[in-house]
Amino acid sequence: MLDNISVGNQILLLRKRNGFTQDELAEKLGISAQAISKWENGHTLPETALLPLLAKLLNCSIDSILSPNTVKEGDLMNFGNYEWRVLQANNDSVLIITETTIGKAPYNDHMADITWENSNIRKYLNNEFYDKFVPAEKSQIVKTKLSDRNNPWYDARCGNSTFDKIFLLSYDEVVRYFGDSGDLQNKKGWYWKEHDGIAPCDDNCHLQYGDCIYDQYNDARKVQNAKGEDNWWWLRSPGHVSHTAGSIGYVGELFLCGDDVYRVDGGVRPTLWLSL
């Protein structure tokens, strides 16, 4: 029996790998872009008569479309109305993060000493955002125990463990899934000079270890919004003091100093465990 979701995710991945937009692939197949979208979202399957041409355009066999391999780390997939990237793949579940930010929001709606446990962004993700999914999709989202540690450079407290359906990544998870240069552990930091931009941390730094990690994995951490504009994005870990939260900067810097929690221009990049 064919699995619409798996087939749809495979078509999405192959389309992206071959450089087609939905409109471009639809034109070559003589169908609507809406039909492609329905395939990729798992709502329908391609008509049998289209499979030979589809396989040719996607440089693959028909079998590889209809019987895709197991989802792998780095793959793109559709779930709900969003495109996600696979960060970790197990036999029966995957950890996924939205490929773009879904919008901008404060970590907390007012200036306060706050942790992830009591933040407004946590409430939003596990209520309003979670409710965007239909019941069948909700049943696939796994409630997960989340633990963190105090800021590894400045010891601002992380708060208690939580159980969440939707969450943000921590510093350690960013390093695990986007690349580890060793700078987090070794406290090799950079700092932001107001007029000159990023500079190596030295005796003039306003924080002992600096503001951020600026390394070869910047590009991997960098993200855009749905309009293709660069966007910085929130993490759930604490910044250097209790009214700040960790973040990823516009060029992919990992900010250990964090940003003030009431800032409204931070991008939101939901993460969840999905049962397959």
Image (tube, rainbow, N blue to C red):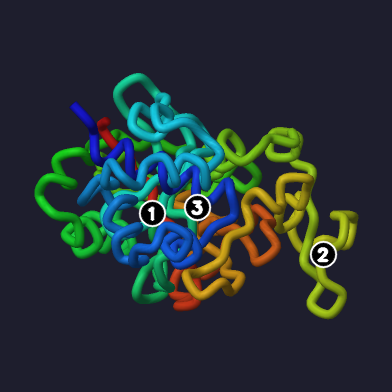
Disc 3 residue type (three-letter):
Pro
According to the picture, the residue beneath numbered tag 2 turns out to be 198
Horizontal side of 116 relative to 171 (left or right) equals left
Marks 3, 1: nearer the viewer: 1
- The one nearer the camera, 173 or 242, is 173
Give the crowd class for mark 2: few <14, some 14-19, many >=20 residues within 10 Å.
some
Write the residue at 54% across / 56% down.
246
Around disc 3, counting alpha carbons within 10 Å, would you say few (fewer than 14), some (14 to 19), or many (20 or more)? many
Q: CA distance from mark 2 to mark 1?
A: 27 Å
Q: Position of residue 181 (x, y in %)?
A: 75, 36
Location of mark 3 (residue): 238
**Secondary structure of residue under mark 3:** strand
Residue 164: x %, y % from top left: 26, 44
Spatial distance from mark 3 to mark 2, Cα to Cα? 21 Å
Q: Considering the numbered disc 2 on the image, is that residue within a helix, a strand or a loop?
A: strand
Q: Which amino acid does the dot numbered 1 rest on? A: Pro
Instruction: Write the residue at 87% across / 55% down.
Output: 200
| Residue 70 coordinates in the image, percent (x, y) | 40, 25
**Element type at marker 1?**
loop
Mark 1, Cα crowd under 10 Å, few <14 / some 14-19 / many 20+, is many
Give the percent coordinates (x, y) of residue 40.
34, 51
**Residue 268 seen in render:** no
Q: Residue at x 67, y 57 (%)?
A: 252
Q: Residue 30, labelled with which disc?
A: none
Decide if residue 191 is in sight here.
Answer: yes
Left of 198 or right of it: where is 271?
A: left
> Circle 1 is placed at which residue position?
270
Query: Which is nearer the N-term, disc 3 or disc 2?
Result: 2
